[in-house]
Image: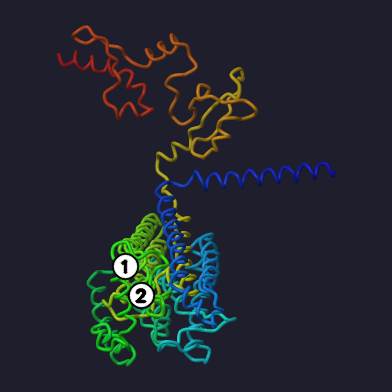
Amino acid sequence: MPGGRSSGASSRASSRRAKRAAQRAKTIFGVPERFERPRLVLCVAVFALVAFGLLMIYSASSIIALTSEAYGNNPAYFLQRQLIFAAVGIGLAALLASQDYHLWCGGLLSVAWIVTTLLLGLVMFTSSGSDAYGATRWIQIAGFTLQPSEFAKLTVVLTVANLCQRYFEEATLDWKHFCRLMFVGVVIPLALVLLQPDKGTTLICVATLLVMLYLSGVPSRFIGLIIVVGLALFFAYAMHDEYSRQRILTMLDPWADPYGTGYQLIQGFYAFGSGGLLGVGIGSGRQKYSYLPMAYNDFIYAVIGEECGLIGSLGVLVGFAAILWAGFRIARYAPDLSGRLIAAGSVSMLVIQLFVNICGVLGIIPLTGKPIPFLSYGGSSIISCLMLVGLTVSVSRSSHLTETDYDRRRSDISLAFRAHPRQDVDDLGPVGEPTPRSASLERDGFKRHDRNLRVVGSSSTPLVRRDLTGEQRASSLASRARITIDAHGRKRIDLGPDAAERLRPHEKASSRNYGERSEGKRRRGR
């Protein structure tokens, strides 16, 4: 009995190892190129931006951290904290990517919405929020500041994807219930964000919402009407608020108060003007020496423009363009509408936030205080952005190809090989499943060569055995092809009526008799 238990446990362990090996082989070799390429492009672009952001955060913050006792006179203070935030974000992104996205936009969506609303309400209606720069957006937790509005962006994307799936594709909601749930699930959290006030996050979420509605099939006229009405209401609300109105006036004429409200924007212009084409070199910028406020956060793009020049600034745009391309390619092959909206909405939100920051730094729109994804310092920002990437990867991992007639025929084909030339029994293996190279070259202690392989199953049979002698191979070819003599006395092989018919195995018999049919038709014509 003990021996039986031991052998049974050993066989189960071997089975588990074989299953894990097959899963690894499928993960590496079994992913179609159309799925794997955008996923790799997305991950590589995000990794490059995060790494570049860490470098620029250290360059932009080292002087202020070194000269401040509040930061322990540690030049790597902000870099060390950003590394921790990035590690947490990568962990959460991996968790989101490892599970089917239907879990996040379906079963756990209500929980995410409740938590998000409670945190936003905690900021608004309690003393937990900390005031900074005219807004109440943060919660102090164990020495770290958490910004709930950053995580509300994920809830908005998941909620819109869920409701659009149920209304446009599944048709389980009518228009009235769709509008009601959209108001509760999206408008209420955005209203709490706007009342902080956090107009930048609200603008980013609304723009992403419009992109997702457009991709769902909402008419362009309706979306255009929403844009016009929304911009009018947004401008009226901004002009009503003294802080927001001053930012609009500063955008229009920053030199009206060059040492007051326009100081930060003007210093950013100086940074861009000093960079030129190639920049002054990473670490050699001058604006970070207490000239440019928040150089490592809101205005890190100005530091990039100064130290890396126009080339570095455009390189950042190229990285986000790669993210946008990869996200929309993933959305294209998503299995349903909710997956398409999650992938497209996530990457659209990242790119929209990028341009909101850049346009503010360049004085094109009022400053919003929103950081650049992956580049600016901020724990809540980089964690939420990496979580959006995790959702996109989850959609990519759930994508699959639609089975066609060719796929079904391929699954019926097997490879028969002899482990030893003198072995009479053929070993059958499926064609459609990936096989590691080491396993395909050696099995049961014997080398396998292609001359011992032949295709069996399905409706196709091997045309020529490669292990035949020259005379046998010529005889086999002659039996499969009709040799005719043309008017000039030259021999030619009649391969059939056309190339398409030669590719149809079930018509081989009729293809062999093509010459007789043609000759019969000519005789009847006479």
Q: Secondary structure at mark 1?
A: helix
Badge 1 density bin: few <14, some 14–19, many ≥20, Cα 10 Å: many
Farthest residue, direction right: 1
Name the side, left or right, on which 223 lies relative to 348.
Answer: left
Q: Residue at (47%, 71%) from the top-left corner?
A: 384
- Tell me if I can see residue 521 in this picture: yes
Query: As shown in the figure, which amino acid type bears the numbered disc 1?
Result: Gly
In this picture, is 340 found above or below 35? below
Relative depth, front residue between 249 and 33: 249
Return the residue found at the far top. Answer: 489
In front: label 2 or label 1: 1
Within-10-Å neighbours for mark 2: few <14, some 14–19, many 20+: many
Q: Position of residue 184 (x, y in %)?
A: 42, 81
Give residue 492's position: percent from left, percent from top: 27, 13
The residue beneath circle 2 is 204
Residue 114 seen by the camera: no
Quarter of the rendering occupied by the N terminus? top right
Give the quarter of the image for residue 246. bottom left
Q: Inspect the image, locate mark 2, and give the three-letter code of the amino acid beneath it.
A: Ile
The numbered disc on residue 275 is 1
